[in-house]
Amino acid sequence: MRKTILLMLLAIQTLACSGGEASAVEPSAGSGNTSQGSGSDQGQNSDPTPDPETTLYVSSADELKALGTLKPGTVVVWRNGLYSDQIAELKSAGTAEQPVILRAEKAGAVCFTGTSRISVSGTCAEVEGFWWRNPEPVSGKSVVTLAKGSSHCTVHDCAITGDNTREDAETDTKWVSLYGTDHRVEGCTFRDKRNIGTLMVVWLEEGVTPRHAIVANHFERPVTLRDDNGKAINGQETIRIGTSTFSMQEAACTVEDNYFYRCHGEQAEIVSNKSCGNTYRRNLFVECQGTLTMRHGNNCTVTGNYFVGNGMSGTGGIRLIGEGHTVERNYLEGLAGTGYRSAICLVRGQENPALSGYWQVKNARVRYNMVYACKYGLNVNYASSSSDQVVPVVSTVIEGNTVSATSSGYAVDCATEPAAPEIEWNDNKLYGRQRGVSLPSLTSAPAKPNVQPAMDAIREAAGCSWKTE
């Protein structure tokens, strides 16, 4: 909560420093192959001595499993050390008032290697302070799973890092799989996943609204796996919420205050939204080749985020597909992407699309965003020339945005063929070339607002509390 308050105060300060215009950003396996004591010497000191009446100590996955389903208020401390191939299961009967806690003896000093992974089932469990280092991919498995039927569980102050793993385009794994409802992944670090498969997935189930929160985490995914023709392979997103099969179902997840750095992955979707009613708020994307993509689903909100490309090729912002999305008060700077990877891209749909296809953009609201010195600012009614996406953007309002483009790009590029879009343009401040429209334009570039303090606050607050380098 204190992190969120700090970030909101800094965003408000940013707004004031930039003149307070609405076009600025939102205010706002085995028996324990261990070497005791040989874990990382980094990290915070452990918590004060726990109550011996409710505290248990373990040094292996077998010992944890032997405890069975843990009663409310139980604290399990995993002793410091380096552990390989630990397939752990945590079964919790915790309550909101008395959660079950599984934590490292010292944050960052319990380090898992090899095929180690954990599955959490039950209610109100908290997992804290663990490090999965260079995980060996096991096809179809996840390093951390919050299981089907589980609810109100938290993964906090943990890290998964793959710096010394090999590139692997064949073995599809996830690092985090979220089933159930009302989970929270907060203050964790995820760096350098080098095998195929989305890093973090929210899995939807019929009739279940997940309502998960993904908050203040640090993500890096610089490696792009390519096929024999040099094309980036699909399935390398950093986060995916849903699947095309369940894309018209409500997910109501929140992704906020996260830091994404060089999350290149599949070079298209950094975050892939495939469900309805999600909120993406106050996230920072720096030098990421791809976009925050509303790929499937409707009625999502993208607000108060920061996208900084520093001129790196392929860096993009926000891509819209589907109905009822709101994109407001975001800051986008120095993005060099074109086409689908423009700063803000509204995509043409297909006729009678399948769930896995491209649905018409309808009833979108794009307002009060600041697009500064990007190659393509607003790319509207876009699709590749060879596609069957012929259904135009309709019933959409684009208003109150401030957009400046580089000299080689466009402030607005609006396709009018094969069918003109239906857009209401209101009070936008545009600097740079236009194509397909003739809207009032500025004679000089708008001033750059001072957003650095707000971006620094997100960066500094994201990730685990202990060093993983």
Image (cartoon, grey):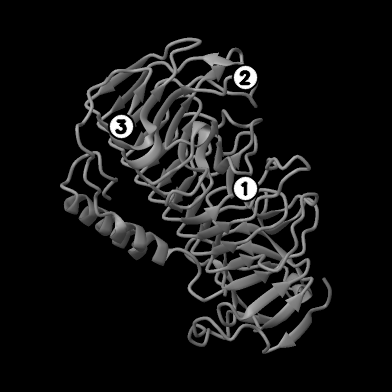
Identify the residue under disc 2: 386
Q: Is residue 76 left or right of 398 when viewed as pictured?
A: right
Tell me the crowding category of disc 1: few under 14, some 14 to 19, or many 20 or more residues within 10 angstroms, Cα based.
many
The CA span between labels 1 and 2 is 31 Å
Mark 1: amino acid = Val
Disc number placed over residue 432 in the picture, else none: 3
Q: Is residue 314 left or right of 200 when viewed as pictured?
A: left
Percent from the top left, x then y, of residue 214? 50, 53
| Residue situated furthest top in the rendering | 419
Whichever of labels 2 and 3 marks the residue nearer the N terminus, that label is 2
Identify the residue under disc 1: 201
Residue 122 appears in which quarter of the rendering? Answer: bottom right
Q: Is residue 115 left or right of 453 when viewed as pictured?
A: right
Whichever of labels 1 and 2 marks the residue nearer the N terminus, that label is 1
Q: Nearer the viewer, residue 415 or 465?
A: 415
Q: Secondary structure at mark 1?
A: strand
Whichever of labels 3 and 1 marks the residue nearer the N terminus, that label is 1
The CA span between labels 2 and 3 is 27 Å
Q: Which quadrant is home to the N terminus?
A: bottom left
Q: Secondary structure at mark 3?
A: loop
Q: Which quadrant is home to the C terminus?
A: bottom right
Tell me the crowding category of disc 2: few under 14, some 14 to 19, or many 20 or more residues within 10 angstroms, Cα based.
few
Residue 231 appears in which quarter of the rendering? Answer: top right
